[in-house]
Image (tube, grey):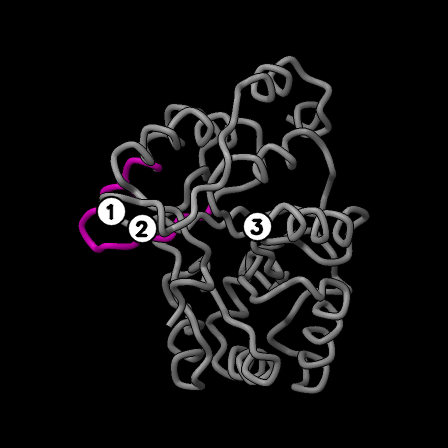
Amino acid sequence: LDKARRGNSPLVDEIMKEPVSKIVPASESKKRAGTIVLVIDDFGYRDDKISDGFLELGVSITCAIIPGHKQTTKFAQKASAAGQEVIIHMPMESSVPTSGKEDYSIKAGMTSEEIEWRIREVFKEMPEAVGMNNHQGSKATMNGKVMSVVGSVLKQEGKYFVDSRTSSATVGEKTMRSLGVPTMRRHVFLDNESDKKEIANQLEQLVKMARKQGIALGIGHARPNTLAVLKKEIPDLLAKGFQFEFASQNVK
């Protein structure tokens, strides 16, 4: 998988050979079967054909980019130039041991001042970002104080928040609404399992929710199999009347 992510794999070449279409504006949808919001996490680790492939899917996607990595700034600029939406994929403390950029992570034991400082710094690093979602964060998003501080900064900055719901006990969405921060929640994780068939099954669940509710938000990751499934399925979904929009168009 690591080789595939770096572009040194037959899978990468196979994926990238497939043609892509131009981004379809919302106004061109003749029959709307439902609205799908795709948030793709974990950009910033690398800059390769797989990352580029998500920018070329032909539909609107929201790119959640992790701060503090070698390709963070470059990919944020590239995604914005490609007409895609950029948000901060903010590292937050998990309930289980994890590894990652400790210098950027929001933790439950931090002071309000430190949380504020860290959030403002990542928006300086990625001025293209119009919002934020949480990377991990099952412990932090359960903490009302932490999420209140996060929400206060986002409101001051005019940004929105997508609650990735890494814990069923999250108070992220609820806190944002109480503060008047535009927000929405994740409905489906597309690729907790990396098998293409499983990803396709999860995408179908997202489609069913979008048809039933009118809108559904799915979170995937910048991985080869996720890209392959989306490239295969998106043209058919467009033909059926599904519309793809940015998170910013649907937060409330």
| Residue occupying image coordinates x 55% and y 56% | 136
Where 91 falls versus 203 (above or below)?
Answer: below
Q: Which residues are magenta?
A: 203-219
User: x and y percent of residue 22 in the render?
Assistant: 50, 36
Looking at numbered disc 2 in the image, what kind of residue is underneath it? Thr
Q: Is residue 218 magenta?
A: yes
Answer few, some or many: residues within 10 Å of disc 3's Cα (few below 14, many 20 plus, some between 14 and 19). many
Where 55 falls versus 113 (above or below)?
Answer: above
Where 101 falls versus 146 (above or below)?
Answer: above
Q: Is residue 37 magenta?
A: no
| Alpha carbons under labels 2 and 3: distance apart | 17 Å
Instruction: Tally the numbered discs.
Output: 3
| Residue occupying image coordinates x 59% and y 60% | 87
Left of 7 or right of it: where is 40?
left
Q: Quadrant of the N terminus?
A: top right
Residue 84 is tagged as 3
> SS class of the residue under badge 2?
strand
Left of 131 or right of it: where is 113?
right
Residue 32 is tagged as 1
Answer few, some or many: residues within 10 Å of disc 2's Cα (few below 14, many 20 plus, some between 14 and 19). many
User: x and y percent of residue 121 in the render?
Assistant: 75, 72
Where 238 falls versus 69 (above or below)?
Answer: above
Q: Quadrant of residue 233?
A: top left
Looking at numbered disc 1 in the image, what kind of residue is underneath it? Arg
